[in-house]
Image (cartoon, rainbow, N blue to C red):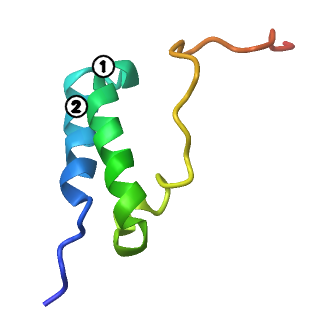
Amino acid sequence: MPQKDPCQKQACAIQQCLQANRYQESMCDDVIKEMRRCCDTQAGNSICCSGFKDSKPTESKSIGKLPFAPSI
């Protein structure tokens, strides 16, 4: 029987939090930090960390703002 992913609980918590908060990442900072901690220690053992481990926390909390004006 395959082993359960060690960071699956944290990955599911992120999805639940984002859905509950209309995908506002800032509302889920605590669960995202828990996932990052898990991936720091379990990256080699967790498929859930495959796209998460190399990502870094964002500096800006603003979503939807472009750093430049789009040309139309």
Pointer 1: residues within 10 angstroms few (<14), some, or many (20+)? some
Q: Residue at label 2? A: 17
Helix, strand or loop at label 2? It is: helix
Q: In this view, does 1 lie to the left or right of 35?
A: left
The percent coordinates of residue 35 (x first, y second) are 32, 47
Residue shown at the point (47%, 52%) measured from the top left: 52
Q: Which amino acid does label 1 sit on?
A: Met
Q: Which mark is residue 69?
A: none
* Quadrant of the rendered image containing residue 34: top left
Name the secondary structure under disc 1. helix
How many labels sit on residues? 2
Residue 1, given in percent of the width and then of the height, sits at: 13, 90
- Answer whether labels 1 and 2 touch (C-beta < 8 Å): yes
* Category of crowding for the residue at label 2, using alpha-carbon neighbours closer than 10 angstroms: few (below 14), some (14–19), many (at least 20): some
Residue found at the far right of this picture: 71
The Cα–Cα distance between marks 1 and 2, rounded to whole angstroms, is 8 Å
Q: Would you place residue 18 above or below residue 2 in this image?
A: above
Please identify the residue farthest to the front as the structure is shown: 41
Picture layout, residue 35 above or below residue 40: above
Residue at 19% from the left image edge and 85% from the top image edge: 2
Above/below status of 52 relative to 43: above
Kind of residue sitting beneath label 2: Cys
Specify the quadrant of the image occupied by residue 25: top left
The percent position of residue 31, horizontal first and vertical second, equals: 26, 36
Q: Is residue 33 left or right of residue 54?
A: left
User: Looking at the rendering, in which quadrant would you find the C terminus?
Assistant: top right
Question: Looking at this view, is 1 or 44 the one in front?
Answer: 44
Identify the residue at horizontal 27%, vertical 50% (top origin): 11
Which one is earlier in the sequence, the residue at label 1 or at label 2? 2
Q: Which residue lies furthest to the bottom in this view?
A: 1
Residue at numbered disc 1: 27
Residue located at (38% from left, 57% from top): 39
